[in-house]
Amino acid sequence: MAKNKKRKNTKTNKAPMKFLVIVTALLVVVMAALLFVVNSDGGSNSSSTHEDRPPINDLATYGNDDPAVSIVEFGDYKCPACGTWDREVFDQLESDYLDHEDISFSFVNFIGFQNESLIASLASQKIYHEASEDQFWDFHHALMQAAGVQGSQVDIDFVVDIASEHAPDVDEDELRTSVAEQEYMDELYAEHELIEEFGVERTPTIFVNDVELSDPFDYNEMERIIEEQLEENS
């Protein structure tokens, strides 16, 4: 009787061990599947090619307005990531490429933070039309790097203060009136249609010709695509 009981206990003890082996095997399979998914996602997150490049005729553009390679940022002045991109990536891009006669940089206004984004974009359009090119881009970068800072409140006084320093040729009262009356709203509507046409859902989104970058902060990838596009289109 004691012997039979011992055998019964031994069989019972083996059951949890068998269960652990099965669970471990399943975990191995799951981990392998996860690794496959991660690797697959890495491939799907590569830069994607569209049927055409975003047109830049009516956009604020730095450089040649008929370039072999057009770099287009879909950005929001109030977006913190856009401010970071402007500080960390644009400076390098400008240094490396924007003196090249075959390359341009253009900006599309994305209104993602409601009224604050709208005020910033309306002010930017006024500066674009009334100031020199140098003053506009000085204003653009100053606003981009200030508006998205945590705690900042973008109102008319905020943009006028930046304009007075970086675009002094624009009359402050005219700027206030332009923003209040939404003078350039039609242009922002047109840019919104461009956003919808190219399926842009987040900022910053960067295009190099018809190629949409998967990671706007991956400068090596951007550089590779610029060089490819130069070779193909110059």
Image (spheres, rainbow, N blue to C red):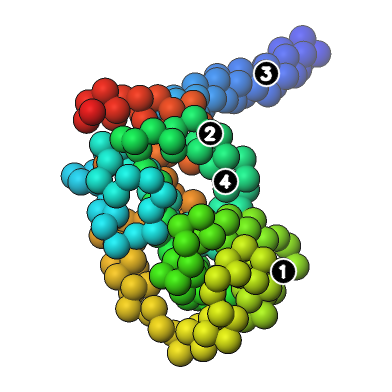
- Which element carries disc 3, helix, strand or loop? helix
- Which element carries disc 2, helix, strand or loop? helix
The Cα–Cα distance between marks 3 and 2, rounded to whole angstroms, is 64 Å
Mark nearest the camera among 2 and 1 is 2
Which residue is disc 1 drawn over? 152
The Cα–Cα distance between marks 3 and 4, rounded to whole angstroms, is 54 Å
Q: Residue furthest top?
A: 3
The numbered dot on residue 85 is 4
Left-right relation of 95 to 193: right
User: Which of the two residues, 227 or 17, is positioned nearer the viewer here?
Assistant: 227
The Cα–Cα distance between marks 1 and 4, rounded to whole angstroms, is 18 Å
Residue type, label 4: Trp
The Cα–Cα distance between marks 3 and 1, rounded to whole angstroms, is 60 Å
- Quarter of the image holding residue 5? top right
Within 10 Å of disc 3 (Cα), the crowding (few <14, some 14-19, many 20+) is few
Residue 141 x/y as whole percent: 58, 55
